[in-house]
Image (tube, rainbow, N blue to C red):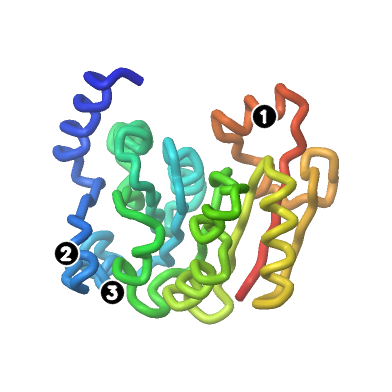
């Protein structure tokens, strides 16, 4: 994507009513106005809140929001030029149960109050294979503890990835910290895989499948 295109998308994001872009300093100072008030202030309902972390183009956010109008969906990513597509689609389709939050995942506890979130999706994150990048893995124990704090008790988490490495790593971490509800290393060759794991395919997922890569999925609680 060219720099002109990115700038155009950044400018458009600023005009979108469903895009929230708080300054990091504001979030760090616990001064983010929507923390603890997503239902009352933004969505103006009491419906469950579902997050998509590292949402990219927001494909899961949009598809799930269309299927479940009685749930609120928030795609989170630091790359606003990516989720521009999802935000624009949500507005075009008049999906009032969708928001996009531009921030770092490690600030999640500063953006949501304790027990404010019902469910979390992590879709095709960077596996951060290099040891020095371990702490940036979206299923690192420190981040999982942050998720646990914002999730309601027994809130569900989903990880979908083409990375066998990340799948295995997460299985090991979750077995020490929580309870695995379902896990399989190749869901498209498993008739028992839940429909919500196979019913939505992201742009990158379709590319992975065309390359013959297996798609892994796990569902767990902390």
Residue 209, image x and y in percent?
71, 28
Depth order, front residue of 121/143: 143
Residue shown at the point (21%, 33%) measured from the top left: 10
Please tell me which of labels 3 and 2 falls first in the chain.
2
Judge left or right: residue 65 versus residue 160: left
On residue 208, the disc is: 1
Could you say whether the residue bearing mark 2 is in a helix, strand or loop? Answer: helix
In the image, is 26 to the left or to the right of 61? Answer: left
The answer to which image quadrant residue 219 occupies is bottom right
Q: How dense is the environment of label 3, judged by Cα within 10 Å: few (below 14), some, or many (20 and up)?
A: some
The residue beneath circle 3 is 36
The Cα–Cα distance between marks 3 and 2, rounded to whole angstroms, is 15 Å
Residue 39 marker? none
| Mark 1–mark 3 distance (CA, rounded to whole Å) | 38 Å
First of labels 2, 1 by sequence position: 2
Q: Residues within 10 Å of mark 2 (few under 14, many from 20)?
A: few
Q: Cβ–Cβ below 8 Å for labels 3 and 2?
A: no
Q: Nearer the viewer, mark 2 or mark 1?
A: 2
Q: Nearer the viewer, residue 148 or 62?
A: 148
- Picture quarter containing residue 86? top left
Q: Percent from the top left, x then y, of residue 63? A: 49, 41
Q: How crowded is mark 1: few (under 14 residues within 10 Å), some or many (20 or more)?
A: some
Tag 3 secondary structure? loop
Residue 166 appears left or right of 13: right
Left or right, 54 with respect to 161, comes to left
Residue 143 in the image: state x and y as whole percent.
49, 67
Badge number at residue 26: 2
């Amino acid at each position: 994507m060219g720099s002109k295109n990115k700038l155009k998308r950044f400018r458009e994001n600023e005009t979108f009513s469903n895009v929230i872009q708080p300054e990091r300093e504001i979030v760090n100072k616990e001064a983010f106005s929507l923390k603890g008030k997503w239902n009352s202030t933004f969505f103006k309902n009491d419906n469950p809140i579902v997050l998509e972390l590292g949402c990219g183009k927001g494909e899961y956010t949009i598809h799930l929001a269309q299927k479940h109008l009685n749930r609120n969906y928030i795609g989170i990513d630091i790359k606003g030029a990516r989720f521009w597509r999802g935000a624009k689609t949500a507005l075009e389709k008049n999906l009032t149960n969708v928001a996009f939050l531009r921030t770092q995942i490690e600030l999640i506890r500063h953006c949501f109050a304790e027990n404010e979130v019902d469910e979390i999706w992590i879709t095709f994150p960077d596996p951060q294979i290099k040891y020095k990048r371990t702490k940036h893995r979206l299923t690192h124990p420190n981040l999982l503890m942050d998720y646990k704090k914002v999730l309601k008790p027994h809130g569900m988490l989903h990880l979908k990835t083409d990375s066998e490495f990340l799948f295995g790593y997460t299985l090991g971490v979750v077995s020490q910290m929580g309870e695995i509800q379902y896990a399989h290393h190749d869901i498209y060759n498993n008739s028992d895989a839940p429909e919500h794991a196979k019913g939505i395919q992201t742009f990158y997922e379709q590319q992975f499948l065309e390359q013959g890569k297996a798609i892994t999925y796990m569902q767990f609680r902390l």
